[in-house]
Amino acid sequence: MNNPDYMEAKKYGEDISLDEELYRNLSGFHIKSLYGPEDIPKFDYGTDLGLPGEYPFTRGIYRTMYRGKPWTIRQLGSLGSPSEANRRIRQLIQMGSTGVSICLDMPTIMGRDSDDPMSEGEVGSCGGVAIDSLEDMRNLLEGLPLDEISINFVSNSQSPVILAMFVAVAGEQGIPLAKLNGTMQNDILKEYQAQKSYYFPPRPSMRLTIDTLRFCSENMPLFNPISISGYHLASAGATPVQELAFTLANGFTYIEEGIKAGLSVDSFAPRLSFFFKAHNDFFENIAKFRAARRIWSRTIREKYKAEDPRSWRFRVHTQTSGSSLAAQEPENNIMRVTIQALSAVLAGTQSLHTNAFDEAFSIPTPRSEKLALRAQQIIARESGVINTVDPLGGSYYIEALTNEMESVSYEYFREIENLGGVISAIEKGFYQSAIADSAFKYQEEIEKKKRIVVGLNEFVTDEEMDIELREPDPEFEKQKVADLTALKKNRDLNVVKTCLSEVRQVIQGSDNVMPVLIKAVKSRVTLGEIINVMRDIFGEFREESIY
Amino acid sequence: MKKSKDIDEMIQQLFAGNRRAASRLITRVENETEDHHEIMKKIYPRTGQATIVGITGSGGAGKSTLTDHLIQKFREQGKTVGVIVVDPSSPFSGGALLGDRIRLQRHFLDDGVYIRSLASRGCLGGLSSATYNVIRILEAMGMDIIIVETLGAGQDEIDIIHIANTCILVATPGMGDDIQAMKAGIMEIADIIALNKSDLEGANRSLRQLQTALSVASLEEGQWAPRVIPTVSIGSRPEDLKGIDELASAITEHQEYLHTTRSIDKVKFERVEEELGLVFKDELQRLIFKGLRGTGKKRKYINSIIEGKNDPYSVVEEILNTYLIRKKKK
Amino acid sequence: MAGERKKRILIAKPGLDGHDRGAKVVARALRNAGMEVIYAGLHQTPLQIVNTAVDEDVEAIGLSILSGAHKTIFPKVMSLLKQKGISDILVFGGGTIPKKDWGILKSIGVGEIFPPGSDTREIAAYLYKVL
């Protein structure tokens, strides 16, 4: 090894590992032992960073960042039963949560009603809410200040229906659409790439997404109609730089599709938001966010000609890394989550979800949930890191890493472009195999101890926590199916039929599907009934490429 | 080793169409267990009647999705279908990842369809002698149609033509240069060319190129003229698909051609000829190496070749002269 | 090579859940360990899985389940195998399956369970040992 740093260090008798391979971040970039001015040779403060709140937003999207407005503390509040979930959400608000995320159960995620044969044994699974009809949405949101609290629906393929129900309930509560806060995840592209909860082929799915986008840009100016999610890509195995590049490319695709549908870019770009994972490598994580802001603002402004500065802002929600949590010595996860959360804050996130230390393996206890929330409050109120904006800006290492993240992203953009764009790359299996490759490589690194997980492959003790699942309660399933059966019996079947045939008609044409969906859910047509009509028209997607 | 009584029983079950028996017999012939000769001898009389359709083409061309639709068509015609999907083994570990079944999953619950994934196990041409035997087993099981899907369309990888009655090459738009390069080979490989993904840009150009390539080929009077059929095999709605019916009828027409012109005799002859050659080669090698076992001679021969004192051709001649031919004269 | 029995393993993801990271990593690792792995993909029903296992003559079926549906799915697969008179195919599992349920699964004949954090080399070694 003739690295001059090492030679110099050796001279002074320093003991250093010569295994360069150990000094790689999760994206596989080689990390030097020291960074200096030579690593950011053409650095220009004005063009590369700019002031916080100013183009290209590398240092943050707001001038005063957390001094002006703290990030949203957004914890998870869902349970199988809509009314129980409602109680849990109220508790979270009481503890100081200013936003809340709501997950759906597997059948709802897959567009099936609770009484569908495929749903058997999975109603209320994975701690998600079972939503069949407007009744469920009403119970879920009862008494919540929808114009104050920001609700994030972790809803994707079924988003148009969930949005229709949300709009209908808000109407019942007398809250004007223009005041509705919140987010619909509604990111279909990453479903094909990683999460695999798709129903239809990508192109009709995209049409539905654009319908929701248009509806929100016309009626719900405070609502975020899509949260473009790298988190799931990363959970499926994408490296941080893949997460960055793939997520942004997806974002650009929504922009292009919106423009293609006749929307002006400034009418919806400001409402697009993002969702990143805070992974283990501290500085790499920070560089990922900074590169994202810079690439997004430049591309939106220069390529897509957005003029409204709000369109240039990369707004992001962050969650700590569920897949980095270990069952071995579970309390270690508190430290992991705290470090990840700190990196997300130093990276300038707009909202943050800290995982409970037992969350990936067990039903979080009120205590572990509280600890997770407290981690955020301690960072915000005790650590002093929020006192100044972007304290790491200008660090040779951070800036060099940000540049590298950015340039590798552009390489990925070119690759995707050469495949004919994002949807075409999905159809060709590009993402599926790139992500599976990274997942396999990561596993190999763990097994060969090139990557250390304390308590798992180093400093191992036999203290382990058992997995404890929020298993679906068979009694709840029975009750839910009974309620749904009753609901289906007590409605006007002719109205249901008319609504469904209207849905069929609209999706065969090109009108926005939202108005007929809102009418349908108000007439107690169920989510599964609506999705089945769409399945009938659009067909079902099958993954063609696997590795 | 299984008792021969068990094997007999399995074979009887195979004749009755039992899938589990078929599966286990396939494993035995694929692994070339010591009784695989016995198995093949016993089933052979019940074979030779199926229509064998070969589907070849490079990875990602859409072979499996076309196979999926063809299975459907044949089932609609009331025919039973056996499918063999050959995928490469890893040259490093000898293992294999076989995932093509995923695209055939709508047939998993159909008793009239049997699907088996085979790893190439180091056989570059795509088809090992084991594949020949697996086809025979599916014939003995009573399958009307056997689809054999293999990777590769290079000129070295056309083993499939020795087995298949009807051979389909799956091409995609934008492989124009490849088409030029394999112009001669194409004619020999393919009875039908499916230009898949024909909804993509450049499809018309590729179609013309293929048609030109085919039209300049000199055909004898009455000889089958290979044809190109534009297809779209991926689509979640029936109306998104294209050319599937045409492809299925082209197969039928080709079969009719083979039978009316008696060309089928030539196809059958070639299949058996190839098979005979393969069995000979395998057996001879096995026999010779078995004979050399324990004598230390194999090692000596190899070393002498490495040292440059000898070459494989002289060695084989020497072995054949000394051991085999003389032995026979005795 | 005459008489060589390659290990053939089926890896499948039953149920509605689409998290296939683990299943794919294990499929690859077993391939690299010299096995022939049939990957059956997402959303497979127990009957589809058992039919595939029969056609492919696998020695083992590995089921990856993260949705909590293991207590529904494993028994269904085991009883279908039994119905078809198959007793020589090993069924093993992976994913988020609580230890407290392992006993129930093992009592109906399921083999080893590999929780998150398992070393893929151990999975391969286990299969080579028991098959």
Image (cartoon, rainbow, N blue to C red):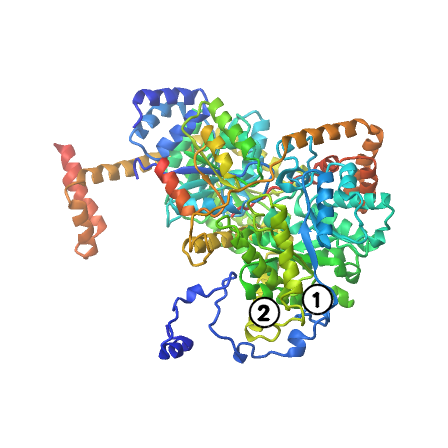
| Residue plotted at (75% across, 64% down) | A311
Q: Which mark is residue A402?
A: 2
Q: Is residue A156 visible?
A: no
Q: CA distance from mark 2 to mark 1?
A: 22 Å
Secondary structure under the numbered disc 1 in the rendered image: helix
| Residue plotted at (48% across, 55% down) | A442
The type of residue carrying mark 2 is Thr
In the rendering, at what x and y percent does residue A115 appear?
Answer: 69, 30
**Mark 1 sits on what residue?**
A66
The type of residue carrying mark 1 is Tyr
Of mark 2 and mark 1, the one earlier in the sequence is 1
Identify the image quadrant of residue A475.
Answer: top right
Image mark 1: chain: A
Residue B309 is left or right of residue A4, and the answer is left
- Within 10 Å of disc 1 (Cα), the crowding (few <14, some 14-19, many 20+) is many
Image position of C46 with respect to A334: above or below:
above
Q: Is residue A522 visible?
A: yes
Q: Viewer-nearest of labels 2 and 1?
A: 1
Quarter in which the C terminus of chain C is drawn? top left
Image position of A48 with respect to A369: above or below:
below
Residue A318 is left or right of residue B159, and the answer is right
In the rendering, at what x and y percent does residue A438 appear?
Answer: 51, 55
Image position of B256 with respect to A299: above or below:
above
In the rendering, at what x and y percent does residue B111 appear?
Answer: 53, 25
> Looking at the image, which is closer to me, A512 or A271?
A271
> Looking at the image, which is closer to me, A486 or B239?
A486
Secondary structure under the numbered disc 2 in the rendered image: helix
